Amino acid sequence: MKVVLINPPDDFLENSGDRPCLGLAYLAGYAQDYGFNDIQIVDMNHDSEIPSADIYGITATTPSYASALKIAKELKKKYHKPLILGGAHASAVP
């Protein structure tokens, strides 16, 4: 099963692309321990293409929530695959 984890662009933070997506990296490592071997992390601060996958995960802080929703809608329309939204915003404001 191919999994793509996405960090949406964050236009509110200066130099937002300078920090690695540690939460997604931890999640990818955890998923690999449970048999998910085809995992890709896409940082939309640097990457513009999201590859096709069997399942998508998007992280969202409150400032990046609007971008995350936009990406989610585009992915659902294009690929019709399961999508999970997580991160600080989803945890704080379910």
Image (cartoon, rainbow, N blue to C red):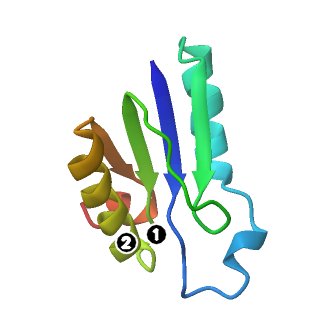
4 lies left or right of 22:
left
Please say if 52 is above or below 32: below
Please say if 94 is above or below 12: above
Residue at 54% from the left image edge and 71% from the top image edge: 9
Q: Say the numbered circle drawn on residue 65.
A: 2
**Position of residue 22 measured from the top left corner of the image (x, y, whole percent):** 68, 51
Residue at 78% from the left image edge and 71% from the top image edge: 18
Looking at the rendered structure, the secondary structure element under dot 1 is loop
Q: CA separation, marks 1 and 2?
A: 6 Å
Residue at 40% from the left image edge and 40% from the top image edge: 56
User: Which amino acid type corresponds to the residue marked 1 in the rendered image?
Assistant: Thr
Determine whether label 1 and label 2 are within 8 Å by CB.
Answer: yes
User: Which amino acid type corresponds to the residue marked 2 in the rendered image?
Assistant: Tyr
Task: Look at the image and tell me in which quarter the C terminus lies.
Answer: bottom left
Please say if 53 is above or below 1: below
47 lies left or right of 20:
left
- Bin the neighbour count of mark 1 within 10 Å (Cα to Cα): few under 14, some 14-19, many 20 and up: some
Name the residue carrying label 1.
61
Q: In which quarter of the image is residue 11?
A: bottom right
- Bin the neighbour count of mark 2 within 10 Å (Cα to Cα): few under 14, some 14-19, many 20 and up: many
82 lies left or right of 15:
left
**Position of residue 38 measured from the top left corner of the image (x, y, whole percent):** 58, 22
**Position of residue 21 measured from the top left corner of the image (x, y, whole percent):** 66, 55
Q: Quadrant of residue 53?
A: top left
Q: Quadrant of residue 44?
A: bottom right
Looking at the rendered structure, the secondary structure element under dot 2 is helix
User: Which callout, 1 or 2, points to the residue nearer the camera?
Assistant: 2
Among all residues in the image, which is located at the extreme top? Answer: 35
Residue at 61% from the left image edge and 16% from the top image edge: 33
* Observer-nearest of 14 and 70: 70
